[in-house]
């Protein structure tokens, strides 16, 4: 008896130790990559970076102002396009599709879609939107990003809803709430924190994507806020700059990488704070 | 000049922003909530940013080869300050450029590999050369400085075929008397992605080595007999710098910017030349553009004592029949400006401008071939 | 939803206050709700059907020319227009397997750490930090792999391994620091934040009543995790891993920088290889031959099918496991 207890304690300590080590490794890698990016990127970030248009190599005071605005517009449009759609599909899988054949197919398809290489999605949107319309456009770029976000939002919504205890649902339904009200006011609220993680992850995923934009929204060195025209983006510019031979462009590329990472960080923290505020107000 | 242009662009934007903001403010003086101000500001920003697009500025979209991306960007930037014309060139690869101009999603395409005359005819396209550059083999060998190592075309091909595997091979030593070549194995580094640079390089190897032509051939991507693939010129440069005993090939600007050890290659006239702007120009000057139908001309292995043998030109593709003649004229005016005033900028970025003779040939071709839908002349512009 | 913010238990009270007759309004609302959600699900199905159809149609040339042989040989020669997918298929499978083998245990560790072990003050910053890794553009991972990881692998790790197990076929070949293993490790790092942050959320959603009762019976933290949290969140954990798996299968940029991009079939972990996604990213923009383009698109189709098969097999296997556990 005592021996077994010692063993249990030992196994526990071992596992806890390993999990701590795993977390440490993860955090160390994170610190490594982030400091690397920060170190190389921060020197490129100054007032010009945020306010000026791109300049050719050899000229000073070039910035990425148009690309920053373009990326914001593209990502926001993609989020608006994909999140409601994804949440609805996730609700379908979690609530109405338990055990059904159709739901199984939708689930599988969503998982397959997660692995679609971003360039394939780009090519698909190119063939479906750009070629028939005859020009590159911000809409096409946003659509490609939305397709990439969709499966992540869908599946995390489903997973998180599945974890909401049925007792909570039943309690609300027993009080006479129609199903949809129960969903929006009980189940979705309970699952919100996890769903938010899913949405944030999907935004992070597309914020750094180049391939789906290359053949859809293209890029531009000028101001462009019209979604019907080619639209500048940080990632395509970053890619072009990183692959160029010029030192000052490399530095701008690292600056862009750093900015993307930091913006997602800010976005993550703000939405978590917002969610906490909402939760606190409610309880 | 610089600041003038900037102000000219900035002012209308500012005025628009102010106008929009004040108009909004007058209308909703009473409801000055935080939210509203924010919305107004965003709206004003959109109006301001969107305004130039509606002001009738000419917007030209082009896409294609990666190699000329920096110089086309630089030209467009300068031209935009002069004239307000917005030329947007994006590097999506030569293959992409050809596909896009065929599909009609862009106003012009750009490619590092020229299209054959019959293919031009098939798709109703015209092409002309715009800018040149050189591809240079680079090595990483301890004690071997830039342009110290000499390679014959035969040896270069055999290295990339995997037939010569050690740096102290007698074939290499024969051309380098006195050099201390290490016993180290050779690691070949090539491009992993499809690339016009690879097209030029393999075109050269095919011209000088029958075995290369038979076993590997010419292409933007080929089935390499040996070696490691790096992504982009930067990737190749990174591998060559890191792997002792490596040899790779990059565009001249990358070799310069990364301070890599280039080598001398024996050209058709038998002299060992080093890569440099004047040896690229020598290769272009020796070329007989006049007798190249559709400007189908590959500048590798050109005659001339000083010619760098692995030189290449980058081409512009446009439709022969232009539905919007006025826009086409603006595009041609831009290229004309580049031919006339772009040389300095090109040399600054380690490119080689086209000789004046070639520019004249190209403009004569515009006048003859590029027409409106009803056959009306587009060029000369006046 | 926002207008209910000030109203505590709006969900329940609001319903009772609703003027509509019970039954009628409710079923209409529910019908619309059900229609909308099902529509979204079907929409997703249609979307991927459209993608598959486009890929199928665009790859017609290559399918006609190579037939099933496309899947059986590893030649990739754009000049002679002779193409086979086997090398890229192997590369995709191998790098993904390595990535999952490395990332899943670490992610479980991180998830457990963040949900149960870490001191309260550390949980949120550490969790956010891990999520942040997902936001780093993939080209940065690629560059990091090329400039930081590859030298370490090539100068330290690979020579060390070869000194000890040099004869074993998995570790043959010149140690230049790039190849299948390095690509797998970079991928592992890329999917780590995806898997671990979802797993953390799954762990956090375990009802505390379940955990408390187990602790109350004297269970250790590990036992609670093993017997309560992991089984309770099993589906969520699988979902998280699937997410990472999908990302690993389809990642382009990061792999391209470190895999070596050689179209060959070599089973050494140190050998250069190629994955389907990296081949597409490398060659699609420059491909100009019709057969070449078509073969690249068929490669995309093959990736779809591979994913489909892998996920289907995984689900069947999971269902069986579920039955054995009596779920």
Image (tube, rainbow, N blue to C red):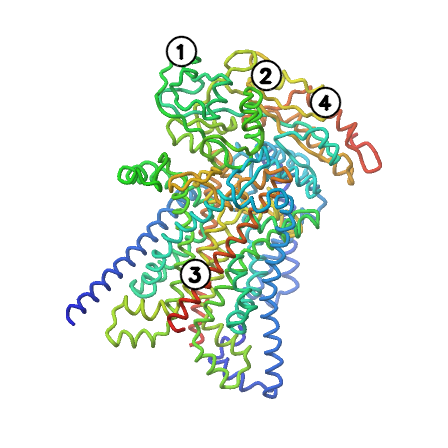
User: Which mark's residue is nearer the viewer, 2 or 3?
Assistant: 3
Do the residues marked 1 and 3 share a common chain? no
Give above or below for B312 relative to A128.
above
Between the C-alphas of marks 4 and 2, the distance is 18 Å
Between the C-alphas of marks 1 and 3, the distance is 63 Å
User: Which mark's residue is nearer the viewer, 1 or 4?
Assistant: 1
- Of helix, strand and loop, which one carries label 4? helix
Image-quadrant location for residue C195: bottom left
Residue C294, image x, y percentages: 62, 43
The first of marks 1 and 4 along the sequence is: 1
- Of helix, strand and loop, which one carries label 3? helix
Per the rendering, the mark at residue B177 is: 1
Give above or below for B252 relative to B82.
above
Q: Residue furthest bottom?
A: C21
> Decide: marks 4, 2 in contact (CB < 8 A)?
no
Residue C92, image x, y percentages: 46, 47
Per the rendering, the mark at residue C240 is: 3
Find disc 4 in the rendering and name its residue: B361
Between the C-alphas of marks 4 and 3, the distance is 62 Å
């Amino acid at each position: 008896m005592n021996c077994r207890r010692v063993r249990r304690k030992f196994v526990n300590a071992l596992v806890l130790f390993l999990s701590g080590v795993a977390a440490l490794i993860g955090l160390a890698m994170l610190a490594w990559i982030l400091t690397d990016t920060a170190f190389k990127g921060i020197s490129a970030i100054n007032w010009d970076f945020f306010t000026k248009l791109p300049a050719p190599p050899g000229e000073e005071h070039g910035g990425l102002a148009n690309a920053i605005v373009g990326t914001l517009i593209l990502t926001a449009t993609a989020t608006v396009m994909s999140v409601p759609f994804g949440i609805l599909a996730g609700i379908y899988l979690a609530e109405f599709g338990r055990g059904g054949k159709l739901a199984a197919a939708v689930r599988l398809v969503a998982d397959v879609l997660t692995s679609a290489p971003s360039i394939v999605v780009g090519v698909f949107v190119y063939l479906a939107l750009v070629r028939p319309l005859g020009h590159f456009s911000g809409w096409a770029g946003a659509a490609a990003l939305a397709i990439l976000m969709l499966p992540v939002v869908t599946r995390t919504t489903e997973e998180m809803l599945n974890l909401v205890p049925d007792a909570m649902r039943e309690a609300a339904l027993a009080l006479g709430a129609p199903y949809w009200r129960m969903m929006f006011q009980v189940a979705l609220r309970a699952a919100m924190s996890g769903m938010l993680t899913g949405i944030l992850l999907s935004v992070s995923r597309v914020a750094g994507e180049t391939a789906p934009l290359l053949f859809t929204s293209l890029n531009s060195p000028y101001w462009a806020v019209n979604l019907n025209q080619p639209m500048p983006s940080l990632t395509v510019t970053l890619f072009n700059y990183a692959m160029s031979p010029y030192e000052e462009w490399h530095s701008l590329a690292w600056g862009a990488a750093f900015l993307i990472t930091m913006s997602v960080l800010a976005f993550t923290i703000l939405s978590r704070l917002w969610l906490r505020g909402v939760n606190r107000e409610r309880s | 000049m610089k600041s003038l242009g900037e102000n000219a662009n900035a002012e209308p934007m500012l005025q628009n922003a102010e106008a929009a903001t004040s108009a909004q403010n007058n209308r909703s003086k009473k409801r000055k909530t935080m939210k509203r101000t924010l919305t107004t500001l965003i709206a004003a920003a959109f109006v301001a940013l969107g305004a130039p697009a509606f002001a009738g500025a000419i917007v030209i979209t082009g896409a294609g080869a990666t190699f000329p991306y920096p110089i086309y960007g630089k030209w467009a930037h300068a031209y935009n300050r002069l004239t307000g014309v917005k030329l947007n060139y994006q590097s999506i690869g030569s293959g992409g450029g050809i596909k896009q101009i065929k599909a009609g999603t862009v106003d012009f395409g750009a490619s590092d590999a020229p299209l054959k005359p019959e293919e031009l005819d098939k798709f109703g396209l015209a092409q002309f050369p715009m800018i040149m550059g050189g591809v240079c083999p680079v090595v990483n060998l301890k004690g071997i400085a830039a342009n110290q190592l000499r390679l014959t075309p035969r040896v270069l091909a055999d290295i990339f075929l995997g037939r010569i595997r050690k740096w102290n091979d007698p074939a290499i030593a024969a051309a380098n008397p006195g050099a201390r070549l290490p016993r180290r194995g050779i690691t070949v580094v090539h491009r992993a992605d499809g690339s016009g640079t690879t097209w030029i390089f393999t075109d050269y190897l095919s011209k000088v080595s029958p075995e290369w032509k038979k076993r590997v051939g010419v292409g933007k991507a080929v089935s390499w007999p040996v070696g490691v693939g790096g992504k982009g010129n930067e990737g190749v440069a990174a591998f060559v710098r890191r792997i002792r005993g490596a040899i790779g090939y990059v565009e001249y600007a990358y070799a310069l910017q990364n301070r890599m050890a280039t080598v001398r290659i024996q050209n058709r006239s038998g002299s060992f030349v080093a890569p440099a702007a004047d040896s690229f120009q020598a290769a272009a000057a020796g070329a007989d553009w006049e007798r190249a139908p559709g400007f189908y001309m590959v500048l590798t292995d050109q005659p001339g004592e000083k010619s760098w043998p692995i030189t290449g030109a980058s081409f512009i593709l446009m439709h022969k029949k232009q539905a919007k003649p006025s826009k086409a004229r603006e595009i041609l005016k831009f290229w004309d400006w580049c031919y006339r005033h772009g040389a300095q900028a090109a040399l600054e970025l380690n490119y080689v401008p086209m000789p004046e003779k070639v520019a004249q040939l190209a403009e004569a071709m515009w006048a003859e071939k590029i027409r409106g839908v009803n056959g009306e002349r587009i060029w000369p512009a006046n | 939803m926002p207008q209910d913010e000030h109203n505590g238990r709006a969900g329940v009270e609001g319903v009772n206050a609703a003027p509509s007759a019970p039954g009628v309004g409710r079923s209409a609302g529910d019908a619309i709700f059900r229609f909308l959600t099902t529509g979204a699900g079907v929409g997703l199905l249609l979307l991927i059907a459209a993608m598959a159809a486009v890929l199928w149609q665009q790859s017609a040339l290559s399918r006609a020319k190579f037939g099933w042989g496309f899947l059986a040989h590893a030649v990739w020669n754009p000049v002679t227009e002779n193409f086979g997918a086997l090398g890229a298929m192997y590369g995709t499978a191998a790098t993904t397997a390595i990535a999952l083998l490395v990332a899943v245990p670490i992610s479980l560790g991180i998830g457990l750490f963040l949900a149960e072990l870490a001191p309260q003050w550390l949980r949120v910053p550490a969790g956010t930090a891990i999520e942040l890794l997902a936001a780093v553009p993939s080209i940065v991972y690629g560059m990091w792999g090329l400039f930081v990881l590859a030298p370490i692998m090539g100068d330290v790790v690979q020579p060390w391994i070869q000194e000890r197990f040099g004869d074993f076929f998995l570790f043959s070949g010149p140690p230049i620091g790039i190849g299948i293993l390095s690509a797998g490790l970079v991928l592992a790092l890329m999917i780590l934040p995806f898997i671990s942050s979802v797993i953390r959320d799954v762990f956090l959603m375990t009802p505390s009543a379940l955990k408390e009762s187990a602790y109350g019976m004297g269970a250790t933290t590990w036992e609670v995790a093993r017997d309560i949290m992991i089984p309770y969140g099993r589906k969520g954990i699988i979902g998280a891993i699937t997410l990472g798996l999908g990302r690993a299968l389809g990642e382009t940029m990061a792999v391209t920088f470190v895999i070596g991009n050689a179209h060959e079939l070599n089973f050494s972990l140190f050998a250069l290889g190629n994955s389907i996604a990296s081949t597409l990213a490398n060659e699609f923009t420059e491909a100009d031959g019709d057969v070449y383009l078509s073969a690249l698109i068929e490669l995309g189709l093959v990736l779809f099918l591979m994913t489909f098969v892998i996920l289907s097999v995984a689900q069947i296997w999971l269902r069986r496991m579920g039955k054995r556990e009596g779920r």
